[in-house]
Image (cartoon, rainbow, N blue to C red):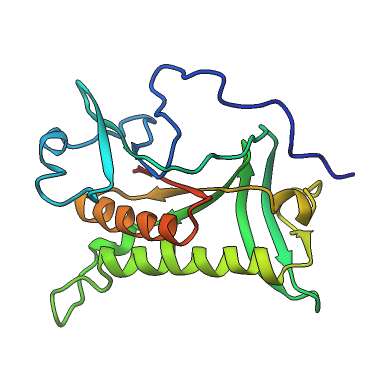
Amino acid sequence: MRRDLHGKVDGEGLKAGQAIETGVTVLGPIVVGAATVPKAAPQSLKTLGGIPDEINTITQTSKGIKSIEAQSTKDISKTSKVEYREVEIVNKTGKPIGEFDKIEQGSFVEEKSAKGLSILHPRTGKPIQTAEQWARKQVYEKSVTRIENLQNEAVSTRATKSGSQDIPSLEEIKSIRKLEFRIEGDSLELRKAVGKELQSLSQKYPDWKFTAEFGK
């Protein structure tokens, strides 16, 4: 049995600590346990070039940055609170052409690890992969491939062995226009690189909303 994704409308008000969900949003670290933001970050992110020009609102607390927001002129469709894990999309030959880690609260969720960015090459002494290179591939390029496949190549959804067995139809997930990245790792360079690619995605798909959360 498939569930309908269109249920109760989310967004009747803001809870304490939530960011306003409009446009492209780069959220601060997930506040779980000891995950915090360096105290120097709130005053220096914009001046150091850590935030794209389009991002115009910084929300601060005594502990540092809570959220960074950018505005969009596009409306976001209504969503539900149903959650699914590891939903595959397949083409007309039955070949898998993408998988969404999670679908929750009417958003696609991609979980990424950026922990290896601090590893230096033993011969050059430079990072094996820069934050810019990582963000371009993991945030922008993979998202473009997945969205294009979803919109143009996919003919159905399919459950995976370790994922949810009761999954939505292709028609249902095609109506989703939100993609959230949950990134394991946090640095000024990473935030800047990810923010740049979120802006690029927003320009390519103006009717979508792209967000990112950073955590330890």
Please say if 127 is above or below 72. below
> Residue 185 at what x, y percent from top left?
33, 50
Quarter of the figure that contains the C terminus: top left
Q: Seen in the image, is 177 located left or right of residue 210?
A: right
Query: Can you tell which quarter of the image residue 161 is in?
Result: bottom right
Q: Is residue 180 left or right of residue 95?
A: left
Where is residue 15 drawn, in percent x and y? 46, 18
Q: Residue at x 26, y 38 (%)?
A: 56
Above or below, 52 against 122 in this view is above
Instruction: Decide which of 198, 119 is in the foreground and name it.
Output: 198
Residue name at image x 44 percent, y 36 percent: 22
Residue 142 relative to residue 35: left or right: right
Quarter that holds the N terminus: top right
Tell me: 150 left or right of 208.
Answer: right
Q: Nearer the viewer, residue 117 or 70?
A: 70
Looking at this view, name the residue that lies furthest to the front.
Answer: 73
**Which of 187 and 149 lies nearest the eye of the viewer?**
149
Q: Residue at x 21, y 76 (%)?
A: 121
Please name the residue shown 73% across and 68% down the image. Answer: 154
Percent x, y for residue 114?
A: 35, 58
In percent of width and height, residue 41 lies at 15, 38
